[in-house]
Amino acid sequence: MVLSKAAPREKNGLLTPPNDTSPPPAYAHGDFNPVVPDITAAFSNLNLAPSPKTPKPTPDLCIAHLKLLEAFHQLREDVACEDGLFGIKDAFADAVESDRERTELLIKIREKRWQIYVTKAARRFKGWWITCVEPSDERNRLLGQSQIPSVFSQSPDVGERLVWREDHLPPLDVIMVWHAYMLNPRDFLEDCLRQGKMRFWRAGLPWVVIDPCIDNNTFEYNASEVAEKYFQDRTGYSWNSLNDFPNPTIECPLCKRKLEVPRTRWDSQHAWTKTSSQKDAELYGELQATGFSDKEFESQCQCGIVIDHELLRTQKFRRDIQALHNLDVPMPGTILDNTGIVEAPKTLSRHPSLFPNRLIEGSSRLLYKKLEAHTVPLKYYNKNMTDIRKEIENSLKDKSYVKLANHKFTHVLQRSEKIAIRRMMSRYWDNSSLFALDLVGAVIRQCSFIEKMHSIDWIHSPAATSTMARLIQKYTRYIDIIGSHPDHTAVPTLDVDLAWHTHQLSPPNYYTYTVAKTARFIDHDDKIEETALSTAFEWTSKIYQKTYDELYSECTCWYCEAIRESHTSMVKRAFGGNKAIETQLDRLHAGNTDPNTSPHISAHNAIKADQDASRGVRDANMKAKLERNYRVACHHARKKGRTPPTRDQYDGSDAAMAYGYPIYMPYYAPYMGDPCVNSGFYAANPGCASFAQGAPGNCCAGACGGGVAAGACGGGGGGGGSGGCAGGAAGGCGGGSGGGCGGGGGGCGGGGGGGGGGGG
C-alpha cells in the first residue's frame, strides 16, 4: 500500500456538524495523542444506502469516494511502473547521457504505458456500455426527435432505476472510465437520453455494491467470480485488462472487414530517441508511432483505404447524420438547451436546440446530401472534420438554408441556434467514440485530482467524517455563489471539488439540487484555459470571503497567499484589515503549511490554449500580477511576524512531481495544467485546445467564436460563466448566460475570466 508522506498525521480535525449554521472552523491539526489511531475506522462502517431525503452528498459518500480514488491511484501506479508493459521498457531511457534527461524520459515512458492502458479501458467501457448496461427504451433503439415532447414531459430524475447487484459490477478500469464520464454531467445525461439508458443514469454509481469490493487496508478492488464471468461472457473481454487481446480490432469503413491493428508503436528504442529537430516533435515516436493508441495512428486495409483517427471521426459524423436521416435520431449536442434542463419544447419545428437537425435535413435535405457525399470513405483521399465545418459554414451564410431550417419563418439565426451548432460540432473534434466526449482525455484529466487526494490523504485521518461534513457545507456555499452570480465563473478548491464530484456521481440528486438552487443543470467543465481558471479562482475567493467572512482557499502556498492579497485593498490594510480573516490566517499559519497536503485551487481541468496569438501576453500578465501580489503577501507576513510564503516547492527541479520523479519546469504554479501530459502521446491531446479562430478543431463561422475545441461549448454550463462566444467568427454569439468554453483568445468570454464551467 502506498501512503502519502502526511498519512501518519491527523489532519483537519473538525467538529462542525453538516447542518450547523455557525461558520465552520479552519482545517487544522488535532492535539497530540500518543494512542495510535485506527486508520481504517472512518471507512469501516459507512452508510451508503441511497435516500431521496438527502439530496446533498453525505460524509460517508465522500469517504467512499476517497476509497475509490485511492484504488484508482494504486491502479495507475501499478500500470505505469510495470517495466515492459505493452513492450515499453524502462531501459529505453538508458540511451540518454544525463541523469536529468533519463528521469524525464522515464516519466514519459510511464505516462505512455498509462495512456495506452486508459485507451484500452475506454474501448472496454464501450463494450460494457453496449452489452451490459440495459437500455430503458422498450424498443431498444435511440431516442427519436418525435419522442422528445413525451420523454421530456417529466423530470429526468423521475422514473425507474437500474438495481445494481455486486455480481454485475465491471472491472476497476471500466469503473474508472465510468467515473470520469459521470463527471461531465451534461454529456452523460445527453448520451443516456439519446441512447435510451435513463435507468442507468438514475441509478448513479452504485456505492452500496462497489465499496465492499475495495479492501480497507490495501485498497485493492476485488469483485466476485460471478461478476468476472458475467463481464467476460457479455463483453468478450477478459476481466483483467492486461490479460485481454494484445491488439484492438477495428472495422474498415469501406469494405467492413475486421482489422487487427497494433496497439502501439512506441515499443522500440528508436521511438524514444530524440529527433534531430525539436520544432515539430521531441521524440521520433511522436512522428512515426502509428499504433491505435498513438497520435499518428495509420493502418491500410486490403481494400486500399488508409484508416487514421481523422477518418474515424468523420465516420462517426457520417453515422450520426444517417441516424438522423433514417431514424430521426437527433444529432449529439442538440438535445439539451443552454440551461441543461430537460423540458418539453413548445414546438419541435422552432426549438432552438434542434436547429442543427433541421439545418442538415431541411425541407429538401440539401445539406444532408452534401455532408453524406463528403463523408463517403474513399481509397485515396478523405475529407476531414475541418472540411465538414466549412460545408456547414457555407450553409449558415446562405439565407435560404437557414430559412428552410426554420420553416420559412426567418433567415436570421438566434443566439441559441448558433450555440446549438457549436455544441454539435464539439462532439466530433478529437473524438471518434460513441460518446459525447473523448473518454480517454476525461480519465487523464482526473488523474491530477486523484493524485492530490492521495497526497492530502484525508482517507487516513481519524477526523475524516467531520472533515467531510465541513467540506460539504463549503460546497453548498459554492453552489449558492453560482446561483447568485450566473454571469461569472466559479472555481472550486480541492475540498469543495471532492464534494462536487461526489454529488455528480448521484445524477438524479445532483440534477434536482442544482436546478433548484440555480435554475439550471450545472455542468462540470473539465477543460478551462489555465489563465482564465486562475482569474476566475481569484474572483471566487474574493466573493466567498466577502459573503461568508471566511477564507476560501485554506492553504499557505505562495499562490494562495498571492490570490488572497489580490482582494485586500491598501485602504483596508491601513485600517487593520478584516479582523476575522486575520484571525483565521493566524490559525492557518500555525497549522499545516505543506502545500502538497492543503486544499487550494482545483486545477485538474486546466488546459493550455494552443495556436492563440494572445496566449503569451495573457500568461505574462498573469505571472506579473501574481508576482506583485506575492511580494505584498511576503511584506505583510513579515509585519505580522510570520514566515513569508516560499516558492521553493515550485521552483527549479522540484517544480512538479510525476510518477515519483521531479519534473523541471521554468515556471509552475498550482493553477497550471497537469505537467505530466505530453501531447505527442495522445490521439486527442487532453491538456490543450485550439482557441484561435479558424484553427483546426474550432467552430463554424457564423455559429460562434473560438473555444469550441475545449469540447465544453454550449452555454450555461458549469460553475456559472457568462456569455457564449465573444468576437471571433462573423456572427459570433454575444453575451448572456451560458458559456461552456474556458475563455481565452476569442473563446468564450464572460464574467469572471472565461465563461463556462469552473469545475475542477
Image (cartoon, grey):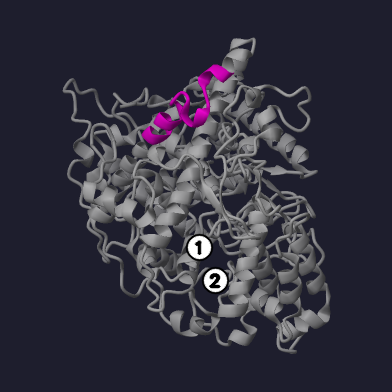
Q: Residue at x 75, y 41 (%)?
A: 615
Answer above or below: position of 725 versus 322. Answer: above
Q: Are marks 2 and 1 in contact (CB under 8 Å)?
A: yes
Q: How far across and down, in percent of the image, does residue 198 sit? A: 39, 69
Q: Secondary structure at mark 2?
A: loop
Q: Residue at x 19, y 41 (%)?
A: 44
Is 77 colored magenta in this rendering? yes
Q: Nearer the viewer, residue 331 or 505?
A: 331
Q: Residues within 10 Å of mark 2 (few under 14, many from 20)?
A: many
Does 690 sit left or right of 460 as displayed?
Answer: right
Q: Nearer the viewer, residue 599 or 24?
A: 599
N-terminal of the pair, mark 2 or mark 1, is 1
Q: Nearer the viewer, residue 522 or 376?
A: 376
Q: Secondary structure at mark 1?
A: helix
Residue 746: quarter of image: bottom right
Q: Residue at x 66, y 77 (%)?
A: 355
Q: In the image, what residue type sits under mark 1?
A: Arg
Quadrant containing the N terminus is: top left
The residue labelled by disc 1 is 186
The residue labelled by disc 2 is 336
